[in-house]
Image: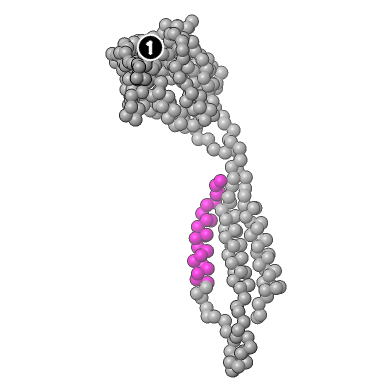
Amino acid sequence: MRFDSPWWLLALAVLPLVAWLRGRSGRDSAFLYSAVSLVKGITALSRSQAGAFLVKLRWLVLALLVLSLARPQLGSGRAPLRASGIDITVAFDLSGSMLAEDFELKGERVNRVTIAKDVLGSFIDGRPNDRIGLVVFAGRAYIAAPPTLDHDFLRRNLERLDTLREQGTAIGSALGAAVNRLRDLKSKSRIVVLMTDGQNNAGDIPPLTAADAAKALGVKVYTIGVGTHGTAPTPVGIDGAGRKVYRQMAVDIDEDTLREISARTGGKYYRADNTQAMRSIYAEIDRLEKSDMEMPKFAYWDEMMQYLAAPAFAFLLLEIVLANTVWRKLP
């Protein structure tokens, strides 16, 4: 719901003032009689409320006309969404090592999947005009969501993600799948954001071969190495009291390959070793790949003016008819 000419609404604030001033102006109407005894028979009569009703009806008419002049409009149907912004595919590592708890969120220790989902969700919310897709991978790559402008659908798919029960990390296959999602999209910019905490040790596509394919198609790749330096506490089971049992596991990210992937495609490599670094990385990507497109929220606006103007004229006609018939005043 919106008003196309909202300045007319200021007149609604003026109407009570005009009504108050009108009530104060002039003197009460009166007839002069030579003797009180002449009107003794009508002094007990009560005053009719007809005049007050007609005045209220007149003010209602004015209020409805002011609202109609403000042109209320009701949005109907979503806007036809066109992919003229930026197309993005995020390749999200969901291998078992992503359960390492070397990040913090709201003062609590969390694993890499949790923090990546939180930061990625904020990134998606900040880019409503861009098509964003999601590829997840461990030993193999899967399409979790094709590039879409339906970000509610995308967020629902993101929230349900958890680690995949597979051995290995297929970085090359994931990058190839992400690039393939963007291949046929005709937009001014196409990018892949690849997040992983390990090395390529599964899949049929070498990472640098996938990078060359991305370069040939004009797809820029930003790579993110997820994990602290050294070792990270990783849950390996539950003890008798129901508490997690941790083991310090080495963080082994193939940074050289990730750097080379980004260098070949014109992107950039980042290391996310803490929560703030992860947020800063996505904030920088957001600044570097900014879409300048503005899209309306609704495609069609139905005019509601007639639904206010018609009752206004009907009440005005009623007021005129009553004032000149059953509630006619003496001259």
Few, some or many residues within 10 Å of mark 1 (<14, 14–19, 20+): many
Q: Residue at x 58, y 35 (%)?
A: 79
- Helix or strand or loop: what does disc 1 sit on? loop
Where residue 30 appears, as percent x and y from the top left, is 57, 84
The residue under label 1 is 198
Quick check: can you spot residue 233? yes
Q: Residue at x 49, y 13 (%)?
A: 141
Q: Give yes or no for residue 18 being in the magenta stretch.
A: yes
Amino acid type at mark 1: Gly
Looking at the image, residue 256 lies above or below residue 272: above
Where residue 45 appears, as percent x and y from the top left, is 62, 82
Where residue 201 appears, as percent x and y from the top left, is 42, 6
Q: Main secondary structure of the magenta part?
A: helix
Q: Depth check: 188 or 5 in front?
A: 5
Q: Give yes or no for residue 93 being in the magenta stretch.
A: no
Q: Residue at x 57, y 81 (%)?
A: 29
